[in-house]
């Protein structure tokens, strides 16, 4: 049961209607076909500005690797605890595992764990993103699929036991594909939530729904009066931070606060976007630069639509999932592309994607550890990969500049 005062999607936006890793959906309309939306009618948003770069690093190289954990089943997200343990979600089982520095795996228990295990794991749905409250890492937020839609819930963690979940944002549109699911705390300490278009591309342009959005909400823990409320400064005075997305899978911030998001394309172009408050990222009218006016460059905002700063064509090359952002670039986990990409920051802006690692199979998430190494979460047991002995696994990758 939702706690009193929990924020539901319907309480903030009037919902008007109820991918595979980049699977086709219905044909994209033009802006003229979308009721209430015309080129130029989107909220005024500046073109994304690339992060400031104190030192340009042309290339990073892998110097060593180490397996941290093996034997995971359809893992989806990681969260680092202060003591060095890693919390991992398993999409289909609904389990949260604590992986210790020595590789031991302990399933979390308690009422919260029981509730998460009841997730509706159909297709791409299930137990997805996870994040710890920066001011109190004993508070855990999770994104999961239930019978009534996708939801973000909060719980307290005492040892290995999770308290009963409290709804933070409920009734987020769900489908067997395109459920979004990534959640992350920004440098402003607010919680950002990636939703998918839930196989309704037309609704990603409908500002009256939560389809295809990034949300920004207050997070003050279970029982908090404002937990899940629209964060101050949101561009539309509701939950929405940006819209016009297909299926955002990764969220991260550069040290100067520049926000990045990775996004599954339909069939032709995957995206890495710099996220600007109030911006319209164009789906389903455009996909990457496809459908843009002649002469449109990466990273520009033209006729009310904001274009990615990097793209992959075709989508089989990437299907970008979780990301990690550092002072020198963005690291992107790729599913269909079976790789980790690095997109370097340059004095001119954002460079071309580079393959960093290509021998782990499908990669669902990456994060920077307290030791500065890159931690990768493979995803070969989700029904679309080719599992190897020991899959799925967390792998520690030590990197250094090539020069």
Image (cartoon, rainbow, N blue to C red):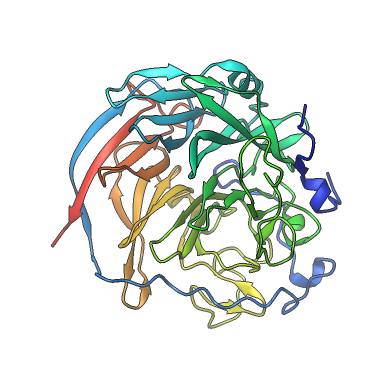
Residue 108 in percent (x, y) is at: 50, 19
Identified at 60% across, 30% down, the residue is 155
Relative to 124, is 240 above or below? below
Numbered circles on residues, count: 0
Q: In this view, does 177 lie to the left or right of 107?
A: right
Q: Which image quarter holds the N terminus?
A: top right
Relative to 198, is 34 above or below? below
Tell which of 143 and 265 is nearer to you. 143
Tell which of 227 and 258 is nearer to you. 227
Determine the image quadrant of residue 93.
top right
Q: Which image quarter holds the C terminus?
A: bottom left
Identified at 36% across, 66% down, the residue is 352
Q: In this view, does 77 lie to the left or right of 359?
A: right
Residue 319 in percent (x, y) is at: 48, 48
Residue 223 in percent (x, y) is at: 68, 35
Identified at 50% across, 39% down, the residue is 136
Relative to 181, is 330 above or below? below
Residue found at the very far left of the displayed protein: 403
Identified at 66% across, 61% down, the residue is 232
Tell which of 167 and 30 is nearer to you. 167
Residue 228 in percent (x, y) is at: 68, 46
């Amino acid at each position: 049961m939702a706690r009193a005062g929990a924020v539901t999607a319907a309480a903030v936006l009037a919902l008007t209607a109820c991918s595979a890793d980049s699977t086709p959906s219905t044909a994209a309309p033009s802006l003229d076909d979308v009721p209430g939306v015309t080129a130029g009618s989107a909220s005024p948003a500046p073109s994304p500005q690339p992060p400031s770069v104190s030192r340009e690093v042309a290339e990073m190289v892998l110097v060593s690797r180490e397996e941290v954990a093996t034997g995971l089943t359809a893992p989806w997200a990681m969260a680092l605890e202060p003591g060095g343990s890693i919390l991992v979600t398993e999409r289909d089982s609904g389990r949260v595992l604590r992986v210790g520095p020595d590789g031991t795996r302990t399933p979390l228990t308690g009422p919260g764990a029981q509730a998460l295990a009841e997730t509706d794991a159909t297709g791409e749905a299930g137990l997805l993103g996870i994040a710890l409250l920066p001011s109190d890492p004993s508070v855990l937020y999770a994104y999961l699929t239930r019978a009534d839609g996708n939801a973000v819930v909060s719980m307290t963690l005492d040892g290995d036991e999770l308290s009963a979940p409290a709804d933070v944002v409920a009734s987020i549109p769900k489908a067997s594909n395109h459920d979004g699911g990534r959640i992350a705390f920004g440098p402003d300490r607010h919680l950002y939530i990636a939703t998918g278009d839930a196989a309704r591309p037309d609704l990603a342009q409908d500002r009256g729904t939560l389809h295809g959005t990034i949300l920004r909400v207050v997070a003050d823990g279970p029982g908090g009066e404002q937990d899940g409320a629209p964060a101050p400064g949101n561009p539309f005075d509701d939950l929405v931070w940006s819209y016009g997305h297909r299926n955002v899978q990764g969220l991260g911030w550069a040290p100067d606060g520049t926000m990045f998001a990775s996004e599954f394309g339909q069939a032709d172009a995957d995206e890495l976007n710099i996220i600007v408050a109030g911006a319209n990222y164009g789906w389903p009218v455009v996909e990457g630069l496809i459908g843009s006016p002649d002469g449109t460059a990466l990273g520009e905002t033209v006729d009310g639509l904001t274009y990615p700063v990097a793209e992959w064509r075709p989508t089989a090359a990437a299907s970008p999932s979780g990301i990690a952002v550092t002072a020198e670039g963005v690291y992107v986990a790729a599913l269909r592309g079976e790789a980790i990409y690095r997109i370097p920051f340059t004095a001119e802006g954002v460079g071309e994607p580079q393959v960093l690692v290509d021998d782990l199979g499908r990669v669902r998430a990456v994060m920077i550890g307290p030791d500065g190494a890159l931690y990768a979460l493979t995803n070969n047991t989700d029904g679309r990969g080719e599992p190897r002995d020991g899959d799925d696994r967390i792998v520690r990758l030590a990197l250094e500049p090539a020069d």
